[in-house]
Amino acid sequence: MGDDARPPQDDRRRAPRPCPICQAMSLPKHHPFCSQRCADVDLSRWLKGVYAVPAREDDEAENGPDKNDDGL
C-alpha cells in the first residue's frame, strides 16, 4: 500500500472564509483568522470568559442531597 495515495496534511488547501473577528478573508497561515492579531483577540476573549460554554447542573446538585440518602 503506497503512502502517496493521500497528500501530506500540509498540502491540503482550506477554502478561504471570512475571519470570525474582523470579517476579512482568512489566510492559510492563520486559518480561520486573517492575521495573528485576530487570532490573539479570539484567544483573549476565551481567556476572559467572553466565550463561555453553558453548563447544565445536575438536579441533585440544585436540590441538595436526596432525602433517602443515608449519608454514608
Image (spheres, helix red, strand yellow):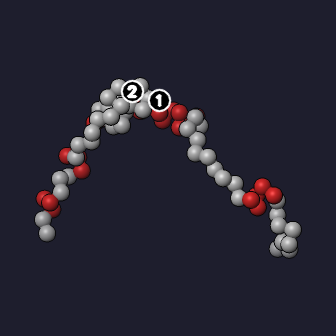
Q: Judging from the image, what secondary structure is the residue with disc 1 in?
A: helix
Picture quarter with the C terminus: bottom right
The crowding category of the residue bearing disc 2, from other C-alpha atoms within 10 Å (few below 14, some 14 to 19, many at least 20), is few
Where residue 46 appears, as percent x and y from the top left, is: 53, 37
Q: Is residue 32 left or right of residue 11?
A: right
- Please determine whether, in this image, residue 61 is positioned above or below residue 71: above
Q: Which of these two is toward me, 56 or 4?
A: 56
Picture quarter with the N terminus: bottom left
Where residue 16 appears, as percent x and y from the top left, is: 29, 35
Q: Mark 1 belongs to which amino acid?
A: Val
Q: Is residue 12 left or right of residue 58?
A: left
* Gap between marks 2 and 1 measured at Cα: 13 Å
Disc sitting over residue 63 in the figure:
none
| Viewer can see residue 36 | no
First in sequence, mark 2 or 1: give its number.
2
Where residue 4 appears, as percent x and y from the top left, is: 13, 59
When asked about the image quadrant of residue 27, the answer is: top left
**Residue occupied by mark 1:** 41
Q: Is residue 11 left or right of residue 33?
A: left
Q: Are marks 2 and 1 in contact (CB under 8 Å)?
A: no
Disc sitting over residue 23 in the figure:
2
